[in-house]
């Protein structure tokens, strides 16, 4: 994006900022590029965690297979969803920053600094939060998939670290046991934490952690009796 700034006229108060930003960034192409980069990373996480999940139930880790439709569907669809969500948030932040700058009558250098500020955040704390949350979600999928393939696991248990960092939403989830393929929450559910405050679970159905960004929870297998 920074590289294109010299070839695209910077916006003024009389220009449509949305049109200008779309001239600088092909968001569809950016979504595709990021999804292609994320897909093999998610697949690698699923492969590694799936093998470990097999070991948890005393089976040979080599029994876990990633060559099935369930795994393929997960890492491809998840990489596409994560990529679009990341870029949608970046686009929203860019429009907010540029709107403020344009209304303030800022010039090229000031607007460039605002753009660099947004992408700087995307490369630091936003990236860290997205990576942690994405890996947690992929790990939960891999656990469930491996335990399903094992044939010896009936249910799953939500395990929450019990320390000073445990949040008000994860704390009441500790020890919750449900069927292996069941959902703890459906997309759109509203969950109340132990302090009475609520969280809207509108991103996806919850079959396991992550319950929220930076969630540290994990799943444990509950064996067939």
Image (cartoon, rainbow, N blue to C red):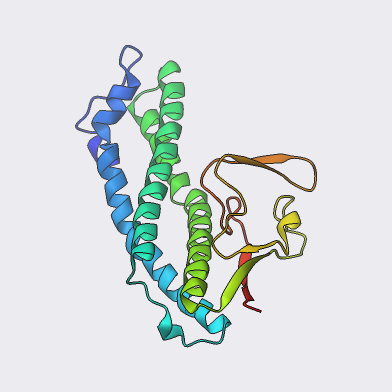
* Residue at figure coordinates x 51%, y 80% from the top left: 54
Residue 41 in view = no
Q: Residue furthest front?
A: 225
Q: From what the image shows, is residue 104 above or below residue 82?
A: above
Residue 59, horizontal then vertical, whole percent: 51, 86
Please tell me in which quadrant of the rendered image residue 21 appears. top left
Q: Quadrant of the C terminus?
A: bottom right
* Residue at figure coordinates x 59%, y 59% from the top left: 209
Residue 158 in view = yes
Q: From what the image shows, is residue 118 above or below residue 105?
A: below
Q: Which residue occupies the foreground of this view, 198 or 86?
A: 198
Q: Quadrant of the N terminus?
A: top left
Q: Is residue 32 left or right of residue 50?
A: left
Q: Which residue occupies the foreground of this view, 4 or 181?
A: 181
Q: From what the image shows, is residue 135 above or below residue 86?
A: below
* Residue at figure coordinates x 41%, y 26% from the top left: 98
Q: Is residue 177 left or right of residue 136?
A: right
Q: Is residue 8 left or right of residue 137?
A: left
Count of numbered circles on the image: 0
* Residue at figure coordinates x 71%, y 61% from the top left: 176
Q: Residue furthest right?
A: 195
Q: Which residue occupies the foreground of this view, 216 or 49?
A: 49
Residue 7, horizontal then vertical, whole percent: 19, 32
Q: From what the image shows, is residue 175 above or below residue 98?
A: below
Q: Residue furthest left?
A: 7
Residue 123, horizontal then vertical, whole percent: 43, 51
Q: Residue furthest top?
A: 14
């Amino acid at each position: 994006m920074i590289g294109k700034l010299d070839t695209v006229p910077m916006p003024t108060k009389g220009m449509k900022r949305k049109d200008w930003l779309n001239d600088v960034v092909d968001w569809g192409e950016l979504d595709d590029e990021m999804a292609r980069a994320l897909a093999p990373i998610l697949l690698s996480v699923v492969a590694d965690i799936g093998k470990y999940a097999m070991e948890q139930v005393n089976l040979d880790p080599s029994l876990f297979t990633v060559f099935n439709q369930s795994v393929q569907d997960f890492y491809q669809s998840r990489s596409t969803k994560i990529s679009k969500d990341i870029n949608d948030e970046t686009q929203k932040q860019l429009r907010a920053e540029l709107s403020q700058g344009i209304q303030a009558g800022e010039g090229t250098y000031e607007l460039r600094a605002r753009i660099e500020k947004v992408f700087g955040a995307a490369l630091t704390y936003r990236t860290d939060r997205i990576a942690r949350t994405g890996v947690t979600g992929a790990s939960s999928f891999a656990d469930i998939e491996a335990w399903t393939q094992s044939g010896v696991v009936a249910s799953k248990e939500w395990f929450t670290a019990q320390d000073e960092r445990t949040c008000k939403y994860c704390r009441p989830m500790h020890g919750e046991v449900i069927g292996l393929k069941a959902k703890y929450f459906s997309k759109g559910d509203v969950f109340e934490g132990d302090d009475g405050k609520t969280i809207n679970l509108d991103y996806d159905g919850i079959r396991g952690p992550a319950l929220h960004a930076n969630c540290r929870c994990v799943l444990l297998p509950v064996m067939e009796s």
